[in-house]
Each structure stands twice: as structure tokens, then as C-alpha cells.
Image: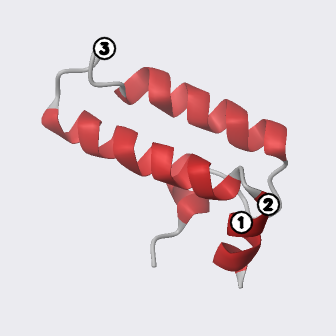
Amino acid sequence: MKDLYNILGLHRDATMDEIKRAYRRLAHQYHPDKNPNSQAEERFKEATEAYETLSDPKKRKRHDH
């Protein structure tokens, strides 16, 4: 299982605001329209997956267990 906190560069006790800020920073940096590098698209997808899981309290709880 991927460490979603590590993908976003966060600690496990990160707040929702910290999760959102980290995701927005990475999304801006790695968005395929702004960064044509092939690895950037993969990083963007990973960050999006991490954000979708960690921003939902139920999904985050399942991930943390």
C-alpha cells in the first residue's frame, strides 16, 4: 500500500487544511498542462489519489488502519 501522506509530504496528524494546501501545491507543480514531463503526469495522478483518500474522513480512517 502506498504511503499517501508521504506522497503529499505530510505527517499522519496533518489537518484538512494542510492536506488541501499540499495537494494544491503538487497539483500546480505537476499538472500535465503545465509540466510536459512524462513523470509529472504520474506524480499528478498519485497526488490526486492521495488527496481524494485523505480528504474524505471515512476513506482516511480506512487508510490509517
Disc 1 crowd, CA 10 A, few/some/many (<14, 14-19, 20+): some
Q: Earlier in the sequence, mark 1 or mark 3?
A: 3
* Real-space CA distance between mark 1 and mark 3, rounded to the nearest whole angstrom: 29 Å
- For discs 2 and 3, the disc positioned in front in the rendered view: 2
Q: Earlier in the sequence, mark 2 or mark 3?
A: 3
* Residue type at numbered disc 3: Lys
As displayed, is residue 63 above or below residue 41?
Answer: below
- Give the farthest residue toward the top: 34
Numbered disc 1: secondary structure: helix
Q: Which mark is residue 60?
A: 1
Q: Is residue 7 left or right of residue 45?
A: right
The reply to whether the C-beta atoms of the residues labelled 2 and 1 are less than 8 Å apart is yes
Q: Which mark is residue 30?
A: none
Instruction: Decide which of 34, 61 is in the foreground and name it.
Output: 61
Give the labeled residue for mark 3: 34
In the picture, the quarter occupied by the N terminus is bottom left
* Residue type at numbered disc 2: Pro
* Real-space CA distance between mark 2 and mark 3, rounded to the nearest whole angstrom: 30 Å
Q: Position of residue 24 (x, y in %)?
A: 59, 27
Q: Is residue 61 left or right of residue 4?
A: right
* Real-space CA distance between mark 2 and mark 1, rounded to the nearest whole angstrom: 5 Å
| Residue that appears at 17% across and 21% down | 36
Numbered disc 3: secondary structure: loop
Give the labeled residue for mark 2: 57
Numbered disc 2: secondary structure: helix
| Residue that appears at 53% across and 69% down | 3
As displayed, is residue 37 above or below residue 47?
Answer: above
